[in-house]
Amino acid sequence: MASLRLISTLCLSIAAALPTMVTAKQTQQVSLLEQRTIVDDKIVLGRAEKVYFPEIEQLSGVGIPAKIDTGADSTSIHATNIEITATDKVFEGLSGMALLNAIAEEFDTLNTYRMRDRKDKTDLMISFDITNPYTGESVRLTKPLYRLAMVKIRGEEGHIPRPVVKLELKIADKTILTDVNLADRERFSYPILIGKTFLSDTAWVDAGFDYLQEQKTAQVIGRKEIATVNGLAMEVSHSLQNRYSILHATDIKVDAKKQQVSFTTQGRTNEKKKMTLPLVKMLKFRDTSRPLVSLPIKIGEAESPTEQFNGHILAYLRDRSKNSSQLRLGREALNKNFVISLGETYLGEKPLDTLETLLKDDTSLMMSPKETINIDGTVVNAVPSGLIKTPVLNVPAINEHKTEHGRVVQYNVVDADGSAHSFEKPIQSKIRVGETVRTVVNVEVNLASSMLLKDVALEANPDAVEEGSLFEISPDLMHGALLVNTRSTNLLDKGQPTKAGYIENVELEGMRFPAKLDTGADVSSMHATDIETFDKDGKKWVSFTYKNAQGNEQAFTREVIDEMRIRARAGEEPQVRLVVSMRVKLGNIEKDVAVNLRDRSRFEYSMILGQNYLKNDIVVSSDQQFIYTGKAKSDKQ
């Protein structure tokens, strides 16, 4: 067995080092549970969270997933069968969009608050349905029409009126009576969008996490489990890459009218069972569509409800008869409910622990599916793996030879930035994995303020030349549990988050100007005109002009690294945008970030920083500006 020694980076004494290492690791892990969930007496929300409707009895205890968006002025929920009743004769005979447009014109909602400020709001009543995602049943509500939200049409002049009502929404322990606009969100990933009407004076948003508020009470499961689905026992595996879970199903029949799906599934002992479940939506893949359902599952048997999982997950249906598991959990289900103990299996055979409980164990380590780790002074990309016993370092090539001191191996490590570093080390041993024989060396693995001396197997992988060396971390790296938390990336590097306003000053190629920090945007965006593409060395390039209200103007030429198809709102056409890499500085945070190009002349800010920038230890306020960078007297918006 490979030896494992803990050495403090601050002290040569191993005895003195152990408490130092434990304190540092505990501080890092506890901060992810405590310090990141509340900042300055405000809760911190992830980019997605569960939302509850405390005033709606039929939805009691039903957490509906929501996107948390500092860039959205309004909060929006998916609603169907919307009907407005108006008592004023001026609206007689009108319905649907014609009625909404007439109301907008009558109250001049784009320019005044007359509609919001009217004393008797029963003159305009609105009825609508909210769907229980677990059962598929519709809940009918009737509310006064509070006001209209006038939503800009992308790429065009004009606005779309949306009805707004007052509803109580609850996230974590915060219940807010807030403005909610009603919309058809069927084509969007989340049925609820939480904007400033909820977030103001209530919450920060950390775009580097999903379901941050669910992290503390997440239940720890093994890399393999047994779950019961409507009483049928199934083998359960997991995926750290795919968003949605998959349930084995055959004879799939979708009833679009009834919004339900009938299918046959099979348990771990080959027992078959027919089921009918509510259809959430049809998921589109490249060459097909598959039904997404709300699946009732149970993991574990315990007297206390907190020591077992008994709830619903989203899963799509497909034939998994050639797989060893009938149910594979995806990131959405893991983010909402679980953390994986990668070195253990079938933890549901005893009461389940929570993440908060297990992190009290000094020997455990929590990591995300994507990390960077310092090995022998070189920072490399790292991922967890439950398929190996000895940790593996992928390198471009291996060259072994004999010296007077014994056999040694020469190899290059390609770091996370693409630079190569040469090493020569004594060969500790050889291990056989199938038909492959791997060379084992001893390396220094730096974690927080501690260091592990660990035997690692080298794997010659030509892909490492272009993609960089990859360190595959096995559960054997640590004495205790290796916990995989899918809610974020680079957990091992997380520190105290930087507080920022939803508007901050950024620096780009010598220019300084205000930008909007938008947690709802996946990719950052900047204003661009005169966009022209051309080929260079067999690759697609683009030239464009950037300018802003501050008087800056500059021409750029960049390689096109991606193309984005922007999902359209109702009544709009989808758009395709070119994506380039730009180096952007926000205070002391400077990084290359993917930015899509579009004409933003109709918008107040010439650049938005999205999730791909904000995931770097930044919490964003939805109601304050220039918290981090300050606003100079000469700054214009």
Image (cartoon, rainbow, N blue to C red):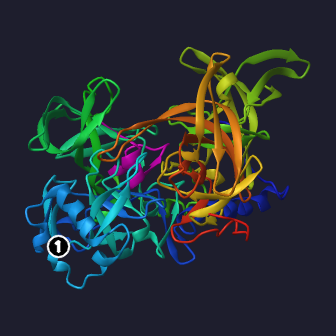
Where residue 225 sits, quadrant-wise, is top left
Residue 297 falls left or right of residue 24: left
Q: Which residue is mark 1?
A: 124
Element under disc 1:
strand
Q: Residue at x 72, y 36 (%)?
A: 417
Image location of residue 303, percent across then percent down = 27, 64
Which residue type carries mark 1? Leu
Residue 582, relative to residue 211: is it above or below? above
Q: Which quarter of the image is occupied by the C terminus? A: bottom right
Total residue callouts: 1
Q: Which residues are magenta?
A: 327-349
Is residue 220 in view from this perspective? no
Image-quadrant location for residue 364: bottom right
Q: Seen in the image, is 632 located left or right of residue 301?
A: right
**Farthest residue toward the right?**
404
Is 242 in front, or is 131? 131
Horizontally, residue 228 falls left or right of residue 478, namely: left
> Hey, which residue is sitting farthest bottom in the picture?
119
User: 5 or 334: nearer the eye?
Assistant: 334
* In front of the other: 411 or 81: 81
At which x and y percent is residue 624?
A: 56, 71
Q: Which residue is painted at 41% across and 48% down in the image? A: 154
Seen in the picture, residue 171 relative to 555 is either above or below; the reply is: below
Q: Residues within 10 Å of mark 1 (few under 14, many from 20)?
A: some
345 drawn magenta: yes
Quarter holding residue 443: top right
Q: Residue at coordinates 36% horizontally, 58% vertically from top-left?
A: 151
Q: Is residue 104 visible?
A: yes
Which residue is located at x 78 percent, y 16 percent? 399
Please state, as top left, top right, bottom left or bottom right, where the N terminus lies in the image: top right
Q: Is residue 357 magenta?
A: no
**Residue 14 in the image: x percent, y percent?**
79, 55
